[in-house]
Protein backbone atom coordinates (compact mmCIF):
# COMPACT_ATOMS: atom_id res chain seq x y z
CA UNK A 1 0.00 0.00 0.00
CA UNK A 2 1.38 3.41 -0.96
CA UNK A 3 1.98 5.90 1.85
CA UNK A 4 0.22 9.24 2.00
CA UNK A 5 3.40 11.00 0.83
CA UNK A 6 3.84 8.63 -2.13
CA UNK A 7 0.27 9.28 -3.25
CA UNK A 8 0.76 13.03 -2.90
CA UNK A 9 3.98 12.83 -4.96
CA UNK A 10 2.17 10.99 -7.76
CA UNK A 11 -0.64 13.57 -7.78
CA UNK A 12 1.84 16.49 -7.77
CA UNK A 13 2.96 15.44 -11.24
CA UNK A 14 -0.59 15.98 -12.52
CA UNK A 15 -2.34 18.84 -10.66
CA UNK A 16 -1.44 21.89 -8.54
CA UNK A 17 -0.77 21.55 -4.82
CA UNK A 18 -4.07 23.29 -4.00
CA UNK A 19 -5.97 20.48 -5.73
CA UNK A 20 -4.45 17.84 -3.43
CA UNK A 21 -6.01 17.11 -0.03
CA UNK A 22 -3.92 15.43 2.67
CA UNK A 23 -5.19 13.29 5.52
CA UNK A 24 -6.09 16.18 7.81
CA UNK A 25 -8.12 17.81 5.02
CA UNK A 26 -9.79 14.52 4.05
CA UNK A 27 -10.72 13.96 7.69
CA UNK A 28 -12.38 17.39 7.69
CA UNK A 29 -14.62 16.50 4.71
CA UNK A 30 -18.24 15.72 5.49
CA UNK A 31 -18.52 11.96 4.87
CA UNK A 32 -22.16 12.46 3.89
CA UNK A 33 -24.55 9.52 4.32
CA UNK A 34 -21.86 6.89 4.85
CA UNK A 35 -19.06 7.16 7.42
CA UNK A 36 -16.94 4.81 5.28
CA UNK A 37 -16.70 7.37 2.47
CA UNK A 38 -13.73 9.25 3.87
CA UNK A 39 -11.59 6.24 4.81
CA UNK A 40 -8.84 7.21 2.32
CA UNK A 41 -6.02 9.53 3.43
CA UNK A 42 -5.62 11.49 0.20
CA UNK A 43 -8.04 13.21 -2.16
CA UNK A 44 -7.72 15.18 -5.37
CA UNK A 45 -9.97 17.92 -6.72
CA UNK A 46 -9.43 18.27 -10.48
CA UNK A 47 -10.97 21.24 -12.27
CA UNK A 48 -11.37 19.75 -15.75
CA UNK A 49 -11.65 16.51 -17.69
CA UNK A 50 -8.01 17.00 -18.76
CA UNK A 51 -6.93 17.07 -15.12
CA UNK A 52 -9.06 13.99 -14.35
CA UNK A 53 -7.34 12.35 -17.31
CA UNK A 54 -3.85 13.24 -16.04
CA UNK A 55 -4.67 11.92 -12.55
CA UNK A 56 -6.18 8.65 -13.80
CA UNK A 57 -3.35 8.06 -16.26
CA UNK A 58 -0.78 8.46 -13.47
CA UNK A 59 -2.76 6.28 -11.06
CA UNK A 60 -3.21 3.63 -13.73
CA UNK A 61 0.54 3.54 -14.36
CA UNK A 62 1.23 3.11 -10.64
CA UNK A 63 -1.70 0.79 -9.90
CA UNK A 64 -3.25 3.29 -7.46
CA UNK A 65 -6.97 2.81 -6.79
CA UNK A 66 -9.37 5.71 -7.22
CA UNK A 67 -12.83 6.20 -5.67
CA UNK A 68 -14.90 8.99 -7.21
CA UNK A 69 -17.13 11.14 -5.00
CA UNK A 70 -20.14 13.24 -5.94
CA UNK A 71 -22.44 14.51 -3.20
CA UNK A 72 -21.91 11.44 -0.94
CA UNK A 73 -25.64 10.72 -0.63
CA UNK A 74 -25.30 7.22 -2.07
CA UNK A 75 -27.01 4.53 0.01
CA UNK A 76 -25.16 1.36 -1.06
CA UNK A 77 -21.59 2.06 0.06
CA UNK A 78 -20.44 2.85 -3.50
CA UNK A 79 -18.27 5.78 -2.40
CA UNK A 80 -16.61 4.01 0.55
CA UNK A 81 -12.82 4.38 0.47
CA UNK A 82 -9.86 2.93 2.37
CA UNK A 83 -6.27 3.99 3.16
CA UNK A 84 -4.01 3.63 0.12
CA UNK A 85 -6.78 4.75 -2.25
CA UNK A 86 -7.28 8.25 -3.65
CA UNK A 87 -10.66 9.98 -3.51
CA UNK A 88 -11.48 11.78 -6.75
CA UNK A 89 -13.61 14.78 -5.75
CA UNK A 90 -15.81 16.03 -8.59
CA UNK A 91 -16.98 19.23 -6.87
CA UNK A 92 -14.23 21.29 -8.51
CA UNK A 93 -15.16 20.36 -12.09
CA UNK A 94 -15.85 23.48 -14.11
CA UNK A 95 -18.57 23.68 -16.74
CA UNK A 96 -21.73 24.78 -14.93
CA UNK A 97 -25.13 24.49 -16.59
CA UNK A 98 -25.97 25.41 -20.18
CA UNK A 99 -29.67 25.08 -21.02
CA UNK A 100 -31.06 25.06 -24.53
CA UNK A 101 -34.84 25.64 -24.23
CA UNK A 102 -35.45 24.88 -27.92
CA UNK A 103 -33.98 21.39 -27.84
CA UNK A 104 -34.93 21.04 -24.16
CA UNK A 105 -31.49 19.85 -23.14
CA UNK A 106 -28.99 20.86 -20.47
CA UNK A 107 -25.25 20.41 -20.90
CA UNK A 108 -23.97 20.16 -17.33
CA UNK A 109 -20.81 19.59 -15.42
CA UNK A 110 -21.30 16.49 -13.29
CA UNK A 111 -20.43 18.57 -10.20
CA UNK A 112 -23.83 20.29 -10.50
CA UNK A 113 -26.38 19.21 -7.91
CA UNK A 114 -29.83 17.93 -8.77
CA UNK A 115 -31.43 20.99 -7.16
CA UNK A 116 -29.19 23.43 -9.04
CA UNK A 117 -30.26 21.84 -12.32
CA UNK A 118 -33.92 21.74 -11.27
CA UNK A 119 -33.81 25.46 -10.44
CA UNK A 120 -31.98 26.38 -13.64
CA UNK A 121 -34.46 24.35 -15.73
CA UNK A 122 -37.43 25.99 -13.95
CA UNK A 123 -36.24 29.42 -15.16
CA UNK A 124 -37.00 28.18 -18.69
CA UNK A 125 -40.33 26.56 -17.78
CA UNK A 126 -38.63 23.17 -17.85
CA UNK A 127 -38.05 20.35 -15.39
CA UNK A 128 -35.31 17.77 -14.86
CA UNK A 129 -37.89 14.96 -14.72
CA UNK A 130 -36.14 13.41 -11.71
CA UNK A 131 -36.82 14.27 -8.13
CA UNK A 132 -35.26 12.71 -5.02
CA UNK A 133 -35.19 13.84 -1.40
CA UNK A 134 -31.38 14.08 -1.71
CA UNK A 135 -31.72 16.87 -4.30
CA UNK A 136 -29.67 19.43 -2.33
CA UNK A 137 -26.47 17.34 -2.38
CA UNK A 138 -26.77 14.57 -4.98
CA UNK A 139 -24.78 15.49 -8.09
CA UNK A 140 -25.54 14.80 -11.72
CA UNK A 141 -22.38 12.66 -11.81
CA UNK A 142 -23.51 10.59 -8.84
CA UNK A 143 -27.03 10.31 -10.25
CA UNK A 144 -25.75 9.01 -13.57
CA UNK A 145 -23.37 6.64 -11.80
CA UNK A 146 -26.12 5.19 -9.60
CA UNK A 147 -28.79 5.51 -12.30
CA UNK A 148 -30.94 7.42 -9.82
CA UNK A 149 -34.71 7.03 -9.98
CA UNK A 150 -36.86 8.78 -7.38
CA UNK A 151 -40.45 9.92 -7.35
CA UNK A 152 -40.95 10.94 -10.99
CA UNK A 153 -39.34 7.86 -12.52
CA UNK A 154 -42.71 6.22 -13.18
CA UNK A 155 -43.45 9.03 -15.63
CA UNK A 156 -40.08 10.09 -16.99
CA UNK A 157 -37.80 7.09 -16.42
CA UNK A 158 -34.59 6.85 -14.44
CA UNK A 159 -31.37 8.77 -15.05
CA UNK A 160 -30.47 6.56 -17.99
CA UNK A 161 -33.60 7.75 -19.81
CA UNK A 162 -32.55 11.37 -19.27
CA UNK A 163 -29.04 10.94 -20.59
CA UNK A 164 -28.42 11.98 -24.20
CA UNK A 165 -24.67 12.45 -24.16
CA UNK A 166 -21.67 12.03 -21.93
CA UNK A 167 -18.03 12.91 -21.41
CA UNK A 168 -16.20 10.35 -19.30
CA UNK A 169 -12.58 9.65 -18.50
CA UNK A 170 -11.45 6.04 -18.60
CA UNK A 171 -8.94 4.40 -16.29
CA UNK A 172 -6.04 4.95 -18.72
CA UNK A 173 -6.87 8.65 -19.00
CA UNK A 174 -8.51 8.53 -22.41
CA UNK A 175 -11.58 10.75 -22.71
CA UNK A 176 -14.80 9.50 -24.29
CA UNK A 177 -16.66 12.52 -25.60
CA UNK A 178 -20.15 12.02 -27.00
CA UNK A 179 -22.08 15.24 -26.49
CA UNK A 180 -25.07 14.19 -28.58
CA UNK A 181 -28.06 16.47 -27.92
CA UNK A 182 -30.74 14.55 -29.81
CA UNK A 183 -32.84 11.66 -28.51
CA UNK A 184 -32.52 9.64 -31.70
CA UNK A 185 -28.97 8.43 -32.21
CA UNK A 186 -28.22 4.86 -33.25
CA UNK A 187 -24.48 4.98 -33.77
CA UNK A 188 -23.07 1.66 -32.67
CA UNK A 189 -22.89 0.50 -29.08
CA UNK A 190 -24.46 3.03 -26.73
CA UNK A 191 -21.40 3.56 -24.56
CA UNK A 192 -22.92 6.28 -22.40
CA UNK A 193 -25.35 3.74 -20.97
CA UNK A 194 -22.42 1.73 -19.61
CA UNK A 195 -21.72 4.53 -17.16
CA UNK A 196 -25.31 4.56 -15.84
CA UNK A 197 -25.27 2.50 -12.69
CA UNK A 198 -21.54 1.69 -13.01
CA UNK A 199 -20.89 3.47 -9.67
CA UNK A 200 -17.51 4.82 -10.74
CA UNK A 201 -16.11 1.41 -11.70
CA UNK A 202 -15.76 2.12 -15.44
CA UNK A 203 -14.75 5.77 -15.60
CA UNK A 204 -15.20 9.24 -14.15
CA UNK A 205 -18.14 11.09 -15.69
CA UNK A 206 -17.26 14.75 -16.17
CA UNK A 207 -19.96 16.24 -18.41
CA UNK A 208 -23.48 15.18 -19.40
CA UNK A 209 -26.20 16.17 -21.82
CA UNK A 210 -29.53 15.78 -20.04
CA UNK A 211 -32.97 15.74 -21.60
CA UNK A 212 -35.45 18.09 -19.88
CA UNK A 213 -39.25 17.94 -19.63
CA UNK A 214 -41.88 20.67 -19.79
CA UNK A 215 -42.42 21.96 -16.22
CA UNK A 216 -45.44 20.62 -14.38
CA UNK A 217 -48.62 22.69 -14.07
CA UNK A 218 -49.84 23.93 -10.69
CA UNK A 219 -50.56 20.95 -8.48
CA UNK A 220 -52.22 20.02 -5.23
CA UNK A 221 -51.39 17.49 -2.52
CA UNK A 222 -53.84 14.96 -1.11
CA UNK A 223 -53.21 12.49 1.68
CA UNK A 224 -55.41 9.41 1.66
CA UNK A 225 -55.78 6.86 4.45
CA UNK A 226 -56.09 3.42 2.87
CA UNK A 227 -56.22 -0.25 3.91
CA UNK A 228 -53.13 -1.36 1.93
CA UNK A 229 -51.21 -1.65 -1.31
CA UNK A 230 -54.02 -3.20 -3.36
CA UNK A 231 -56.28 -0.24 -2.64
CA UNK A 232 -53.45 2.19 -3.31
CA UNK A 233 -52.94 0.68 -6.74
CA UNK A 234 -56.63 0.99 -7.63
CA UNK A 235 -56.70 4.65 -6.59
CA UNK A 236 -53.43 5.38 -8.39
CA UNK A 237 -54.67 3.82 -11.61
CA UNK A 238 -57.82 5.95 -11.56
CA UNK A 239 -55.92 9.20 -11.05
CA UNK A 240 -53.37 8.13 -13.64
CA UNK A 241 -56.08 7.47 -16.22
CA UNK A 242 -57.43 10.98 -15.66
CA UNK A 243 -54.06 12.27 -16.90
CA UNK A 244 -53.54 14.37 -13.78
CA UNK A 245 -51.23 12.21 -11.68
CA UNK A 246 -47.85 13.83 -10.96
CA UNK A 247 -46.54 11.93 -7.93
CA UNK A 248 -47.86 8.93 -6.01
CA UNK A 249 -46.06 7.72 -2.91
CA UNK A 250 -47.21 5.03 -0.52
CA UNK A 251 -46.24 4.95 3.17
CA UNK A 252 -47.17 2.06 5.43
CA UNK A 253 -48.36 2.87 8.94
CA UNK A 254 -45.07 2.14 10.78
CA UNK A 255 -43.06 4.45 8.54
CA UNK A 256 -45.57 7.33 8.48
CA UNK A 257 -46.24 7.40 12.23
CA UNK A 258 -42.56 7.07 13.01
CA UNK A 259 -41.66 10.15 10.94
CA UNK A 260 -44.69 12.06 12.20
CA UNK A 261 -43.70 11.39 15.82
CA UNK A 262 -40.04 12.21 15.25
CA UNK A 263 -40.76 15.47 13.43
CA UNK A 264 -43.64 16.70 15.59
CA UNK A 265 -46.10 16.37 12.69
CA UNK A 266 -48.60 13.96 14.28
CA UNK A 267 -51.37 16.46 13.40
CA UNK A 268 -50.90 15.55 9.72
CA UNK A 269 -52.06 11.99 10.35
CA UNK A 270 -54.67 12.93 12.97
CA UNK A 271 -57.49 12.72 10.38
CA UNK A 272 -57.11 8.93 10.44
CA UNK A 273 -54.28 7.85 12.69
CA UNK A 274 -54.92 4.09 12.64
CA UNK A 275 -54.86 3.51 8.89
CA UNK A 276 -52.71 0.62 7.65
CA UNK A 277 -51.21 2.87 4.98
CA UNK A 278 -51.22 6.39 3.56
CA UNK A 279 -51.07 7.46 -0.04
CA UNK A 280 -49.66 10.86 -1.02
CA UNK A 281 -51.06 12.01 -4.34
CA UNK A 282 -49.74 15.10 -6.09
CA UNK A 283 -52.05 15.90 -8.94
CA UNK A 284 -52.84 18.63 -11.43
CA UNK A 285 -56.58 18.01 -11.08
CA UNK A 286 -58.81 20.60 -9.42
CA UNK A 287 -60.00 19.79 -5.89
CA UNK A 288 -63.52 19.08 -7.20
CA UNK A 289 -62.26 16.82 -10.00
CA UNK A 290 -60.03 14.83 -7.67
CA UNK A 291 -62.76 14.43 -5.05
CA UNK A 292 -65.21 13.25 -7.73
CA UNK A 293 -62.61 10.76 -8.91
CA UNK A 294 -61.96 9.23 -5.49
CA UNK A 295 -65.58 9.33 -4.35
CA UNK A 296 -66.33 5.73 -5.48
CA UNK A 297 -63.30 4.51 -3.55
CA UNK A 298 -64.86 5.61 -0.25
CA UNK A 299 -67.81 3.38 -1.10
CA UNK A 300 -65.62 0.42 -2.12
CA UNK A 301 -63.56 0.76 1.08
CA UNK A 302 -60.32 1.47 -0.80
CA UNK A 303 -60.17 4.92 0.79
CA UNK A 304 -60.96 5.32 4.48
CA UNK A 305 -60.51 9.07 4.65
CA UNK A 306 -58.67 11.83 2.81
CA UNK A 307 -57.40 15.36 3.37
CA UNK A 308 -56.34 17.88 0.77
CA UNK A 309 -53.61 20.40 1.62
CA UNK A 310 -55.12 23.88 1.76
CA UNK A 311 -51.81 25.75 1.69
CA UNK A 312 -48.19 25.36 0.68
CA UNK A 313 -47.23 24.73 4.30
CA UNK A 314 -49.81 21.94 4.67
CA UNK A 315 -48.49 20.38 1.48
CA UNK A 316 -44.91 20.74 2.75
CA UNK A 317 -45.85 19.00 6.03
CA UNK A 318 -47.29 16.02 4.14
CA UNK A 319 -44.22 15.83 1.94
CA UNK A 320 -41.90 16.17 4.97
CA UNK A 321 -43.40 12.95 6.35
CA UNK A 322 -42.84 11.20 3.04
CA UNK A 323 -39.30 12.50 2.48
CA UNK A 324 -37.71 12.47 5.94
CA UNK A 325 -36.88 8.78 5.77
CA UNK A 326 -33.85 9.43 7.96
CA UNK A 327 -36.16 10.38 10.84
CA UNK A 328 -37.84 6.97 10.59
CA UNK A 329 -34.53 5.15 10.17
CA UNK A 330 -33.18 6.72 13.35
CA UNK A 331 -36.12 5.33 15.33
CA UNK A 332 -35.08 1.75 14.57
CA UNK A 333 -32.61 -0.29 16.60
CA UNK A 334 -29.94 -1.98 14.47
CA UNK A 335 -31.53 -0.86 11.22
CA UNK A 336 -31.06 -2.71 7.94
CA UNK A 337 -32.28 -1.22 4.67
CA UNK A 338 -33.46 -2.66 1.36
CA UNK A 339 -34.46 -1.13 -1.95
CA UNK A 340 -36.35 -3.49 -4.24
CA UNK A 341 -38.81 -3.36 -7.13
CA UNK A 342 -41.86 -5.58 -7.42
CA UNK A 343 -44.22 -5.75 -10.41
CA UNK A 344 -47.37 -3.90 -9.41
CA UNK A 345 -49.66 -6.92 -9.73
CA UNK A 346 -47.54 -8.76 -7.12
CA UNK A 347 -46.99 -5.88 -4.70
CA UNK A 348 -49.75 -6.62 -2.20
CA UNK A 349 -49.06 -10.35 -1.99
CA UNK A 350 -45.31 -9.72 -1.71
CA UNK A 351 -45.85 -7.40 1.28
CA UNK A 352 -48.14 -9.90 3.01
CA UNK A 353 -45.65 -12.71 2.38
CA UNK A 354 -42.76 -10.62 3.67
CA UNK A 355 -44.65 -9.73 6.84
CA UNK A 356 -45.24 -13.43 7.50
CA UNK A 357 -41.59 -14.31 6.88
CA UNK A 358 -40.45 -11.56 9.25
CA UNK A 359 -42.80 -12.80 11.98
CA UNK A 360 -41.12 -16.20 11.86
CA UNK A 361 -37.64 -14.76 12.34
CA UNK A 362 -35.87 -14.49 15.73
CA UNK A 363 -36.41 -11.24 17.62
CA UNK A 364 -39.35 -8.91 17.12
CA UNK A 365 -38.65 -7.13 13.84
CA UNK A 366 -40.03 -3.64 13.30
CA UNK A 367 -40.68 -2.77 9.65
CA UNK A 368 -40.80 0.66 8.09
CA UNK A 369 -41.89 0.63 4.46
CA UNK A 370 -42.61 3.17 1.77
CA UNK A 371 -42.92 2.94 -1.98
CA UNK A 372 -42.50 4.97 -5.12
CA UNK A 373 -45.77 3.30 -6.02
CA UNK A 374 -45.84 4.00 -9.75
CA UNK A 375 -42.91 1.72 -10.40
CA UNK A 376 -43.34 -0.75 -7.53
CA UNK A 377 -40.14 0.43 -5.87
CA UNK A 378 -40.27 -0.35 -2.14
CA UNK A 379 -37.84 0.98 0.45
CA UNK A 380 -37.77 -1.26 3.49
CA UNK A 381 -36.01 -0.57 6.80
CA UNK A 382 -36.07 -3.16 9.56
CA UNK A 383 -34.81 -3.07 13.09
CA UNK A 384 -34.78 -5.25 16.19
CA UNK A 385 -33.50 -4.92 19.75
CA UNK A 386 -30.62 -7.37 19.41
CA UNK A 387 -27.84 -6.70 16.90
CA UNK A 388 -27.89 -8.87 13.78
CA UNK A 389 -25.47 -11.77 13.75
CA UNK A 390 -24.20 -13.02 10.37
CA UNK A 391 -26.75 -15.86 10.19
CA UNK A 392 -29.79 -13.74 11.02
CA UNK A 393 -28.68 -10.93 8.72
CA UNK A 394 -28.39 -13.33 5.80
CA UNK A 395 -31.77 -14.83 6.68
CA UNK A 396 -33.25 -11.32 6.72
CA UNK A 397 -31.78 -10.54 3.29
CA UNK A 398 -33.13 -13.78 1.92
CA UNK A 399 -36.57 -13.11 3.41
CA UNK A 400 -36.62 -9.82 1.50
CA UNK A 401 -35.24 -11.33 -1.72
CA UNK A 402 -37.55 -14.34 -1.72
CA UNK A 403 -39.46 -14.57 -4.97
CA UNK A 404 -38.40 -11.12 -6.18
CA UNK A 405 -36.50 -12.25 -9.29
CA UNK A 406 -39.06 -14.95 -10.13
CA UNK A 407 -41.79 -12.30 -10.15
CA UNK A 408 -39.73 -10.19 -12.54
CA UNK A 409 -38.65 -7.69 -9.89
CA UNK A 410 -35.22 -6.35 -8.95
CA UNK A 411 -33.23 -6.87 -5.71
CA UNK A 412 -31.66 -3.44 -6.11
CA UNK A 413 -34.08 -0.93 -7.57
CA UNK A 414 -32.44 2.49 -7.58
CA UNK A 415 -29.62 2.69 -5.03
CA UNK A 416 -27.21 0.37 -6.83
CA UNK A 417 -24.97 -2.42 -5.59
CA UNK A 418 -21.95 -0.61 -4.10
CA UNK A 419 -20.52 -2.72 -1.29
CA UNK A 420 -23.71 -3.35 0.60
CA UNK A 421 -25.68 -5.31 -1.99
CA UNK A 422 -22.84 -7.45 -3.34
CA UNK A 423 -24.01 -10.66 -1.69
CA UNK A 424 -27.61 -10.05 -2.65
CA UNK A 425 -26.55 -9.37 -6.24
CA UNK A 426 -24.37 -12.47 -6.30
CA UNK A 427 -27.21 -14.66 -5.02
CA UNK A 428 -29.68 -13.38 -7.59
CA UNK A 429 -27.75 -12.45 -10.73
CA UNK A 430 -27.59 -14.54 -13.87
CA UNK A 431 -24.12 -16.13 -14.08
CA UNK A 432 -23.67 -15.30 -17.78
CA UNK A 433 -24.62 -11.67 -17.11
CA UNK A 434 -21.96 -11.47 -14.40
CA UNK A 435 -19.37 -12.92 -16.79
CA UNK A 436 -20.27 -10.33 -19.43
CA UNK A 437 -20.09 -7.54 -16.85
CA UNK A 438 -16.63 -8.71 -15.74
CA UNK A 439 -15.48 -8.72 -19.37
CA UNK A 440 -16.61 -5.10 -19.76
CA UNK A 441 -14.84 -4.11 -16.54
CA UNK A 442 -11.61 -5.80 -17.63
CA UNK A 443 -11.75 -4.21 -21.08
CA UNK A 444 -12.19 -0.67 -19.74
CA UNK A 445 -10.16 -0.94 -16.53
CA UNK A 446 -7.64 -3.78 -16.99
CA UNK A 447 -5.63 -2.81 -13.90
CA UNK A 448 -8.74 -2.61 -11.74
CA UNK A 449 -7.99 0.88 -10.36
CA UNK A 450 -11.53 2.28 -10.53
CA UNK A 451 -13.57 1.74 -7.37
CA UNK A 452 -12.44 -1.89 -7.01
CA UNK A 453 -14.64 -4.29 -5.06
CA UNK A 454 -17.81 -2.38 -5.84
CA UNK A 455 -20.71 -3.57 -8.04
CA UNK A 456 -19.14 -6.86 -9.15
CA UNK A 457 -19.12 -9.65 -6.57
CA UNK A 458 -15.99 -11.80 -6.36
C1 LIG B 1 -32.48 11.32 1.83
C2 LIG B 1 -32.09 10.55 0.60
C3 LIG B 1 -33.04 10.27 -0.35
C4 LIG B 1 -32.70 9.55 -1.50
N1 LIG B 1 -33.67 9.28 -2.41
C5 LIG B 1 -33.34 8.62 -3.54
C6 LIG B 1 -34.34 8.34 -4.51
O1 LIG B 1 -35.52 8.66 -4.36
N2 LIG B 1 -33.94 7.71 -5.64
C7 LIG B 1 -32.65 7.32 -5.85
O2 LIG B 1 -32.35 6.75 -6.90
N3 LIG B 1 -31.69 7.55 -4.92
C8 LIG B 1 -32.01 8.20 -3.80
N4 LIG B 1 -31.05 8.43 -2.85
C9 LIG B 1 -29.68 7.94 -3.07
C10 LIG B 1 -28.70 8.95 -3.66
O3 LIG B 1 -29.13 10.28 -3.50
C11 LIG B 1 -28.45 8.67 -5.13
O4 LIG B 1 -27.85 7.41 -5.27
C12 LIG B 1 -27.58 9.72 -5.83
O5 LIG B 1 -27.66 9.50 -7.21
C13 LIG B 1 -26.11 9.71 -5.41
O6 LIG B 1 -25.49 10.88 -5.92
P1 LIG B 1 -24.19 11.49 -5.21
O7 LIG B 1 -23.73 12.65 -6.02
O8 LIG B 1 -24.45 11.77 -3.78
O9 LIG B 1 -23.17 10.29 -5.38
P2 LIG B 1 -22.13 9.68 -4.34
O10 LIG B 1 -22.84 9.16 -3.14
O11 LIG B 1 -21.03 10.63 -4.11
O12 LIG B 1 -21.58 8.45 -5.19
C14 LIG B 1 -22.42 7.38 -5.52
C15 LIG B 1 -21.67 6.45 -6.48
O13 LIG B 1 -21.42 7.10 -7.71
C16 LIG B 1 -20.00 7.19 -7.99
N5 LIG B 1 -19.80 8.52 -8.58
C17 LIG B 1 -20.17 9.73 -8.08
N6 LIG B 1 -19.88 10.71 -8.97
C18 LIG B 1 -19.30 10.12 -10.04
C19 LIG B 1 -18.80 10.60 -11.29
N7 LIG B 1 -18.82 11.89 -11.62
N8 LIG B 1 -18.26 9.71 -12.16
C20 LIG B 1 -18.20 8.38 -11.85
N9 LIG B 1 -18.68 7.87 -10.69
C21 LIG B 1 -19.23 8.74 -9.80
C22 LIG B 1 -19.34 6.96 -6.66
O14 LIG B 1 -18.05 6.39 -6.82
C23 LIG B 1 -20.31 6.02 -5.97
O15 LIG B 1 -20.07 4.71 -6.41
C24 LIG B 1 -31.37 9.12 -1.69
C25 LIG B 1 -30.40 9.42 -0.73
C26 LIG B 1 -30.75 10.12 0.40
C27 LIG B 1 -29.67 10.44 1.38
Image: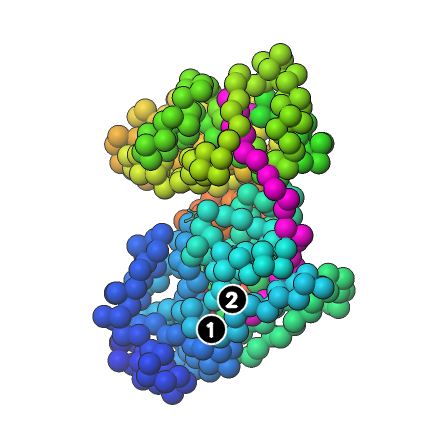
From the viewer's perspective, tell me whether residue 389 is left or right of residue 296.
left
Q: Is mark 1 within 8 Å of ligand 1?
A: yes
x then y, percent, for residue 33: 36, 52
Extreme bottom residue here? Answer: 13
The residue that label 1 is drawn on is: 93
The number of numbered badges drawn on the structure is 2
- Judging from the image, what secondary structure is the residue with disc 1 in? loop
Using residue 2 as the reference point, say whether residue 416 is left or right of it: right
- 362 in magenta: no
**Residue found 57% across the figure and 29% down from its top:** 347
Residue 87 spot, x, y in % from top left: 37, 69
Q: Are marks 2 and 1 in contact (CB under 8 Å)?
A: yes
Disc 2 target residue: 110
Q: Is residue 227 magenta?
A: yes
Are there few (<14), some (14-19), or many (20+) residues within 10 Å of tag 1?
many
Using the numbered discs, state the Cα–Cα distance from disc 2 to disc 1 in whole angstroms: 7 Å
Q: Which mark is residue 257?
A: none
Q: Residues within 10 Å of mark 2 (few under 14, many from 20)?
A: many
Q: Visible in this render: residue 351?
A: no
Q: Which secondary structure is most common in the magenta stretch? A: strand
- The image quarter in which residue 254 lies: top left
Q: Secondary structure at mark 2?
A: loop
Q: Earlier in the sequence, mark 2 or mark 1?
A: 1
* Range of residues picked out in magenta: 205-229
**Is 428 placed above or below 207 here?**
above
Seen as rendered, the residue at the extreme front is 311
Amino acid sequence: MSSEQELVDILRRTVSDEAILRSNQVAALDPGWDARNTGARVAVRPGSADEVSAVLSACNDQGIQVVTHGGRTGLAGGAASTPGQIIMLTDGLQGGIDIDPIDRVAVVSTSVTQQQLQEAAAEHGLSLGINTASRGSATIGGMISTNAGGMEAFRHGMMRQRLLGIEAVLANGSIISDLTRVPKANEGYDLKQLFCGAEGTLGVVTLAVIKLEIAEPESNTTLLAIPGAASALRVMRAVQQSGGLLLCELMWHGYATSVANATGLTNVLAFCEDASAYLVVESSLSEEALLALIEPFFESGDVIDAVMAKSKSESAAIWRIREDSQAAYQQLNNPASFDISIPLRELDSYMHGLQQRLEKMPGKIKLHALAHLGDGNIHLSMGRETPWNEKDKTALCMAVEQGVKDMGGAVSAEHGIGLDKLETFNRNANTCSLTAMRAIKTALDPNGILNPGKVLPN
